[in-house]
Image (cartoon, rainbow, N blue to C red):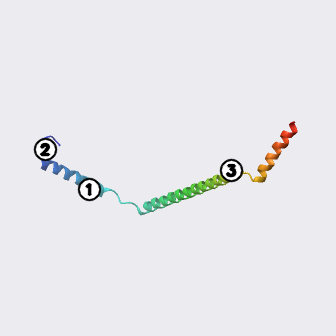
Amino acid sequence: MTYNSSFQDRAAQAAQAKQKALEQLRSKPPVDEKVAAERLAAGKQREAAKAEKAAAKKAERAEAAAAANAEAAAKAAAKAPKTEAELKAARDARYAKRKGRK
């Protein structure tokens, strides 16, 4: 393609390039059915492995979340406010300790 090429020249070159691409496409050998079936089976196998791995990861995340929730519940139970009787017992213990020092 040159600087002074006309529209007809460019259109003819485009048509030639298109024809060449079509000929290359037609000259490709057809896909073997056996090979295509193997590729399809391999793709399905990869997809199944991927799905299995994702399910395992999801289950692991669920286990971790459940463990974290249980741990949080245990911490909350440990930090539960003391009952009146527990507060009174602690107060009495401090009082007895203080009286013991005198």
44 relative position to 22: left or right: right
Q: Are marks 2 and 3 in contact (CB under 8 Å)?
A: no
Front-most of residues 88 and 11: 88
Query: Badge 3: few (under 14), some or many (20 or more) residues near its Cα, within 10 Å?
Result: few
Residue hosting label 3: 75
Q: Earlier in the sequence, mark 1 or mark 3?
A: 1
Mark 1 or mark 3, which is nearer to you? 3
Identify the secondary structure beneath mark 2: loop
25 relative position to 63: left or right: left
Q: On the image, which quarter does residue 29 sit in?
A: bottom left
Whole-angstrom CA distance, mark 2 to mark 3, is 83 Å
Residue hosting label 1: 22
Q: Earlier in the sequence, mark 1 or mark 2?
A: 2
> Which residue shows up at 13% across the image and 48% down it?
7
Question: Looking at the image, how many numbered discs can be counted on the residues?
Answer: 3
81 relative position to 46: left or right: right
Query: Badge 1: few (under 14), some or many (20 or more) residues near its Cα, within 10 Å?
Result: few
Q: Position of residue 67 (x, y in %)?
A: 65, 53
Mark 2 or mark 3, which is nearer to you? 3
